[in-house]
Image (spheres, grey):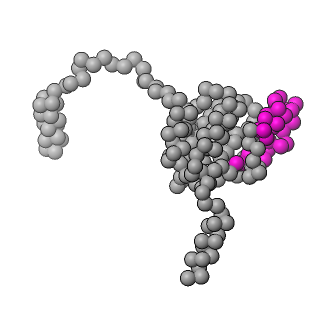
Amino acid sequence: MKKHIIFSLVICLTVACGDTNHNLPKPEKTTVVKVDWEDELQDQVKLLGHRNWIVVADEAYPLQSSPGITMLRSNADHVKTLKSVKDIIDGQGHIKPIVYLDKEIDYIDESAAPGITDYRKTLNEVLRQKNVQKVIHDDIISMLDKASKQFNIVVIKTDFTIPYTSVFFQLDCKYWDSESETHLRDKMNKN
């Protein structure tokens, strides 16, 4: 009886509403809309704050399934992408980066990964920062996984094929440092 009522209701709705799609051509394939990664990052970086991450990744970086991770694809080479990302972050008034590199990068020989020596030199020139930390790759991935449960992460993937060359920017507050936070907490604990 329930099936007849539901079926009758569906028939009535179909007749009453009509089939409005019968004149539309069926798509031959799925349409993929590509966005310019720099424009997308410029839009998103205004919403990002401390505890968010931006990653410039090499070709083998995995497509992660965590809902807090957005993957973008750069059409520029790895170093140009890295420079653009750094410039975008440095141009913000509200965030500054804490930079993480894979610790493995220091142990790769040129014979195993041609181009690694030049890349390390270029990386030092591009980053020029005192707060670069080198951490085992799997530990950085774990940090990202944990962060993505509460905070957004933007990964910009390049076509670079030298291992352990991804650069991880953990965003921090530019106008409030850890010393100020410690002072504030000490003051609060005294009251």
Residue at x-position 42% and y-position 20%:
29
Q: Is residue 66 above or below residue 84?
A: below
- Total numbered badges shown on the rendered structure: 0
Q: Is residue 187 above or below residue 77?
A: below
Q: Would you say residue 103 sits in the magenta stretch?
A: yes
Residue at x-position 85% and y-position 42%:
107
Residue 21 position by quadrant? top left
Report the magenta residues as a range: 99-125
Q: Is residue 123 left or right of residue 11?
A: right
Residue 40, visible in the rendered structure: yes
Residue at x-position 60% and y-position 57%:
175
Residue 167 position by quadrant? top right
Residue 162 position by quadrant? top right
Q: Residue reaching furthest bottom?
A: 191
Q: Would you say residue 90 sits in the magenta stretch?
A: no
Residue 138, visible in the rendered structure: no
Q: Is residue 140 left or right of residue 68?
A: right
Query: Which quarter of the image is occupied by the C terminus?
Result: bottom right
Residue 75 screen position, x and y as percent: 61, 26
Query: Which quarter of the image is occupied by the N terminus?
Result: top left
Residue at x-position 68% and y-position 51%:
98
Q: Nearer the viewer, residue 129 or 169?
A: 129
Q: Is residue 6 left or right of residue 185?
A: left
Residue 95 screen position, x and y as percent: 59, 51
Residue 144 screen position, x and y as percent: 62, 50
Q: Nearer the viewer, residue 167 or 146?
A: 167
Residue 59 screen position, x and y as percent: 67, 32
